[in-house]
Image (cartoon, coloured by chain):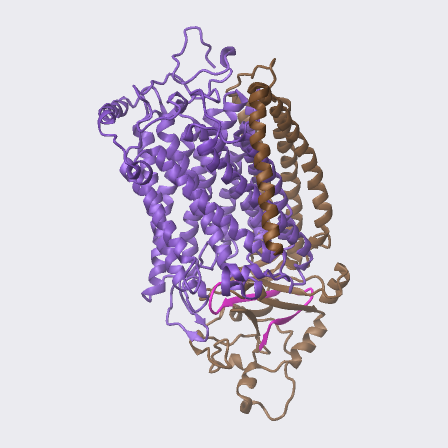
Amino acid sequence: MTQFLLIAIVVMIFVVIFQIAKASEYVSVLKGEEKARKQTNKINAFMLISFLIVGLIGVWWCNDLFFGRTLFPQGAASEMGQKIDLMLYITIGVTGVVFVITQILLFWFAFKYQEKDDRKAYYFPHNTKLELLWTTVPAIFLTVLVVFGLKYWFKITSDAPKDAVVVEVTGHQFGWEFRYPGADGILGKKDYKLTKGANGLGVNFDDEASHDDIHVSTTMHIPVNRPVKFVINAQDVIHDVGLTAFRIKMDAVPGIPTTLWFTPLYTTEEMKVRTGNPNYVYEISCDQMCGKGHFSMRGVIIVESEADYKKWLATQEPEYFTIFPDKKPKTDTPAVADSSAKPAPLAAMVDKK
Amino acid sequence: MSTTAVLHGEDIHAAHDAAHEHHHHETFISKYVFSQDHKMIAKQFLITGMIWAIIGGLFSVLFRLQLGYPESTFPWLEDLLGHWAKGGKLQPEFYYALVTMHGTILVFFVLTAGLSGTFANFLIPLQIGARDMASPMLNMLSYWFFFTASIIMFASLFVQTGPASGGWTIYPPLSALGDASSGSKIGMDLWLASMAMFIVSSLLGGLNYISTILNLRTKGMSMTRMPLTIWAILFTAILGVLSFPVLLSGAILLLFDRNLGTSFFLSDIVVNGKILPNEGGSAILFQHLFWFLGHPEVYIIILPAMGISSEVMSVNSRKPIFGYMAMVGSMFAIAILAFLVWAHHMFVTGLNPFLGAFFVLLTLLIAVPSAIKVFNWLTTLWRGNIRFTVGMLFSIGFVSMFISGGLTGIFLGNSSLDIHLHDTYFIIAHFHIVMGVAGFFGMFAGVYHWFPKMYGRFLNSTLGYIHFWVTLIGAYLIFWPMHYEGLAGMPRRYYDFSGWESFKMFAELNQFISFVSILVFAAQLLFVFNFFYSIFKGRRVTSENPWGSNTLEWTTPVNAGHGNWPGEIPEVYRGAYDYGKDGRDFIPQTEPVGENESHH
């Protein structure tokens, strides 16, 4: 019933607007069309200048309202991310000035040069000097932005430092799997054709390097203040490892491994204080459309101190033993603790198949 | 210069004149359905585009309901959509189908076919002084291929597994594997078939536009005397003809991968527990093929809008467009650069960073011709005597939107920022403002300005003003705050954000945006109503040249028949922008240059 009422009200509003519009047409005929047109012209000129003023105030107000919520004031949580923030502020500065100036000119000119009986339009078809001016000035500003941008771009995409913690990230519909290389620092070989049952990642367990690899789902642990390198895969469709707090992301493409690296600056606990949100966690969002569960493809990153990280790592059982429990050595000594600090050999980072 | 071409054109006209006299006993079918009159074909494109715009807009209202009110249920949705909205809540599969179809419809069917199809067909012969297109037959076919594409796409909405739902960019493997998504079943095949038809339509149209502009200009209409609308359409057509075939090839390869077991885009895939045999393909290859069209596509949308706005702004400022040659040159530069920037959509695909650097450079280079255009528009307004017709207001709105959306392009084109902003609401805000809203504003400006020429009646201007103001304010209210969501990293194409610690703080904002979008959609319905009402009942146009315009279309009779001019095609003696010259309000292109006339 309420729906019909609602529809009736909407239709009514439409009818009223239409009647007003129709009536205004008749009124303008009565009043003299030229006179009515000039009056409307004035109203619209006034509306334009009002729109400019209210709009600029609105822009400022909107910033006041939402900038805090973006968690930008807290700064990026990774070293490279802070550079990206700086770059962003520079770009906002440059484009902001252009935005304000051009919008003001646009609406101010429209208001100022509205039709008046005593005004004659000024015949001004071109002016080479002016045109050269606004070709070169933007070109100079853009050059600055390009130079800054590319400098950071090459840093972001440079090779990860040798002492980086390596984690293999695999996306699938709709979740994340993480594999750590274990004590030997080498990720065991994989072959997607071996993916079956418990061996969800298609690890080739004939490769001895795989025997100490650790496989966890959804929640990843990494140490703070140490470079972390992700080797990224996807099993089915394209996903994307989105790390908004670290200001970086990279696609996960089936058949084509990609990488990214960053250095986290704050532990999860520290971030809870920084954001004033006791529930804060670093999240991995899937940023590339991957099917109906795309929006729920959530991963969690726990950034913790080196000591806590090592402690956590020591409690994890290698995947080899969970799949082949009979292969487990009888005396259960945690052999992981001493070797996890060993840098991962480069070969492990690219080795996939 | 091109005397032979012009003479040749005249021969055709002469022959056509003769034909005009004799065999125009038009039936309903030949006049309104299988018409070969460019003006009727333009109207067909426009009305089909409007119908699609309503459907596409309605889809966005539906998915905005979900985004704004993720916790609520709407029982009437279930009555309307059945199992797609079980319990009054849109299902995720259907949400993604809506998002995909919204993008496809608006980008291709409305802002490409609806915009170029309408104004290229309508304006080219009228503004260059030709009886019709170079090939009226191809022109008619162009519409009917578009119509076929429309029917197929529309049909795909009703298949049991749903329409395509992998995003309008249809990236494989998602779009290639029925096992990965129900929308990638028959719905995807229909999408590809429809797109193939659409591309044929676009190519037939484009070839026709180019050959008409190059060959059929009336006597005296040299290239540099053409209105900017025609230049814009010429560049648009060239872009389309060179880039759409690449999408066609991508679509065909994708059809092969889907149905014939090839591995162009597929490799190392385990989906739904099934191990696929495909090896050696590259999913990224498709993105290269797609964006080689996809990027020029955004200029295919924005160039005609630029041309229309330039023309409308000049006429209503009563001033020449400032820097005509610079306007043409910057459009040329944009058209060239359009082909060299496609991989800026792919910075985070694992693209070689060195290659990425070139795409950064070339992408930001586009800002230079864009800046020239903006400053030239501003100078066109400067010291004018401006009449705020509805078309003029939409043109001013176009420039405002183009500035706002163009500047955010500088963020996204810089790969070191894109690595954070890619696929977030920042990009949604950017392209909706610069391509969506600005494209629409150009289109509205054109419709309000040339409606008197199309139908011999005016659109109701009060409704027009309401339409403009609600749309301008609403568009900013919808898209401006989205930049902040994007800065926070809020990903696009999410069905529900409530489970995310990083994104849930924007719930109220999303509700606000949804509310405004419903309002703006309602304002568009007002326009649609105004359009159809005014065709039959609008105020009649009494003079041939109601806007005091220089261009040739206003020398035709109010209701021009097939062939446009009853007598000879007028000769042209000057450029299209002699407004306010030598103290005269306007000097039509058909007026010979006077002896004492000043040279600029």
Colour representing chain B = purple
Q: Is residue A275 above or below residue A142?
A: below
- Residue B215 appears in view: yes
Residue situated in front as seen by the camera: B76 or B420: B76
Taking the spot 42% from the left edge, 52% from the top edge, the residue there is B290
Taking the spot 22% from the left edge, 24% from the top edge, the residue there is B18
> Main SS of the magenta segment?
strand
Q: Position of residue A25 (x, y in %)?
A: 56, 27
* Residue A307 falls within the magenta-colored stretch: no
Taking the spot 36% from the left edge, 47% from the top edge, the residue there is B147
Q: Quadrant of the N terminus of chain A?
A: bottom right
Q: Position of residue A198 (x, y in %)?
A: 51, 82
In magenta, the rendered stretch is A215-239
* Residue A216 falls within the magenta-colored stretch: yes
- Residue B465 appears in view: no
**What residue occupies the far top of the structure in this picture?**
B596
In the rendered view, does A275 fall on the left or right side of B469? right
Q: Is residue B523 above or below residue A30?
A: below
Q: Position of residue B506 (x, y in %)?
A: 67, 55
Q: Position of residue A148 (x, y in %)?
A: 60, 45
Residue situated in front as seen by the camera: B407 or A114: A114
Q: Quadrant of the C terminus of chain A?
A: bottom left
Colour representing chain A = brown
